[in-house]
Amino acid sequence: MAQLFHRSSNTLSKVSIFAVLFLIAGALAFLYAYHNSDYMTYVDVPREQPVQFTHEHHVAGLGIDCRYCHTSVEKSSFAGIPPTETCMSCHSQVWTNAAILAPIRESFRTGIPVKWTRVHDLPDYVFFNHSIHVAKGIGCESCHGRVDKMPLMWKANTLYMQWCLSCHRDPAKNIRPRDQIVTMGYKPAEDQAVLGPKLVNEYHVNVKQLTNCSICHR
């Protein structure tokens, strides 16, 4: 019987198989890199706002406590976006005619809230409770980064599931005394490897339960 295919067909078939596998691997690598890129995560990317509020000035410069603006962070799942009245509690006295604050004054006059751009916005299928993290000794800085060094607000961490799980699997490395929750640049008074497990026990952190899917997905 006559040979139907040229001898080189075997080589071509092997090359084509490897080429397809290479393309699939390359595509997967590209998707992984894209998924974790700043373009997708917005990590270290300052976000434009209706008013260019600077945490650096208010936190580091003026020493304003996080809880003055984010009033519900200790008792609610939502930290709270400060209402215009909170801004005007100061700016009815200082910088009263500053052009940059015109949207704030207009919001206060009309009662229409300022439409701030969310910087940390979890998917709808993720449940996150600020109050329980605060109660268990997780500081603002652990998730939001050094906001006292942010002239404009940006994400310091991806907030992807693997990032959250890195803490849920070992909360002792991030846990701190409750009176240090809002401290920026926190340095533990003793070795964190000693202090962390001590606070995990003191605050009754159930480490085994923290990796249960129902903790975050309800």
Image: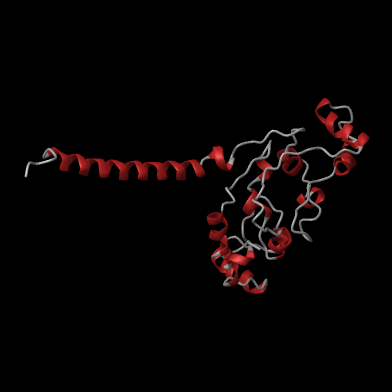
Residue extending farthest to the top is 99
Viewer-nearest residue: 197 or 43: 43
Q: Nearer the viewer, residue 215 or 64?
A: 215
Q: Position of residue 49 (x, y in %)?
A: 73, 34
Outermost residue, front side? 1
Q: Work out whether 99 lies above or below 40.
A: above
In the shown orientation, is residue 163 left or right of residue 76? left
**For residue 61, what is the image quadrant?**
top right
Viewer-proximal residue, 133 or 160? 160
Residue at 75%, 54% (x, y): give it.
78
Q: How far across and how far down the image is residue 211, in percent?
A: 56, 66
Q: How many circles with numbers are drawn on the protein?
A: 0
Q: Residue furthest left?
A: 1
Q: Where, quadrant-wise, is the C terminus in this rendering?
A: bottom right
Residue 40 spot, x, y in % from top left: 56, 40
Which residue is pictured at 65% across the width and 50% down the height? 122
Q: x, y (%) of residue 70?
A: 78, 50
Q: Is residue 6 visible?
A: yes
The colour scheme used to paint the residues is secondary structure
- Is residue 170 shown above or below 19? below
Please report the residue visible at 6 percent of the width from the left and 45 percent of the height from the top: 1
Q: Is residue 43 visible?
A: no
Q: Quadrant of residue 58?
A: top right
Residue located 90% across and 37% down the image: 108
Q: Quadrant of residue 212?
A: bottom right
